[in-house]
Amino acid sequence: MKAAGIDFGSVRIGLAVADDLGSLAHPRPFVDGRDRKRALAALAEFAKSENIEVFVLGLPRTLSGRESQSTRAARQFARQIQKATGLPVEMVDEWLSTKQALDRLRDQGINAKGAKSRVDSAAAAIILQSWLDGRR
């Protein structure tokens, strides 16, 4: 099953895609999240071009595990993706995925300025990789 990971944000929507074997997640360029209608159209086109069968969306929670406004926004976005693409959306906890992504980018020698355009898709890859690992 070809899967795509999403790190939802109001400014940038990070994207990642699984390889053909469903083993490894690879970051893709982010989608501009400031215009929801355009973002959903871009995700629909991405799904077609990459033969995506399922989206995996990170579900943000507070550190105590409670739901927040961000959690509710992500759930709403999942419903919008389903409607726009006709594809299922699975949600997975994204405990500190952005921090992990920043740490990994820093370990690769990418400075804070360079990481800004990559961090959301790197976080999407972490979210998707977690989902892929859980399916094995």
Image: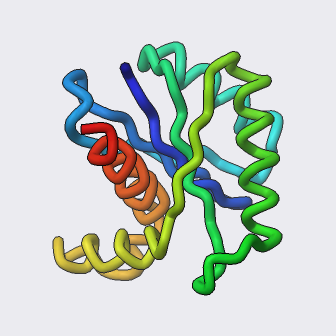
- Residue name at image x 62 percent, y 66 percent: 60
Residue at 66% across, 60% down: 9
As drawn, is 52 to the left or to the right of 75?
A: left
Q: Is residue 60 left or right of residue 93?
A: right
Q: Quadrant of the N terminus?
A: top left
Q: Residue furthest bottom?
A: 64
Q: Position of residue 6 (x, y in %)?
A: 53, 46
Q: Position of residue 41 (x, y in %)?
A: 71, 26
| Colouring used for the render | rainbow
Residue 50 occupies quadrant: top left
Image point (63%, 54%), residue name:
8
Q: Nearer the viewer, residue 18 or 65?
A: 65
Quarter that holds the C terminus: top left
Residue 44, position as x, y percentages in the image? 64, 22
Q: Residue 82 appears in which quarter of the rendering?
A: top right
> Relative to residue 22, is residue 29 depicted above or below?
below
Q: Which of the pair 51/91 is nearer the observer?
A: 91
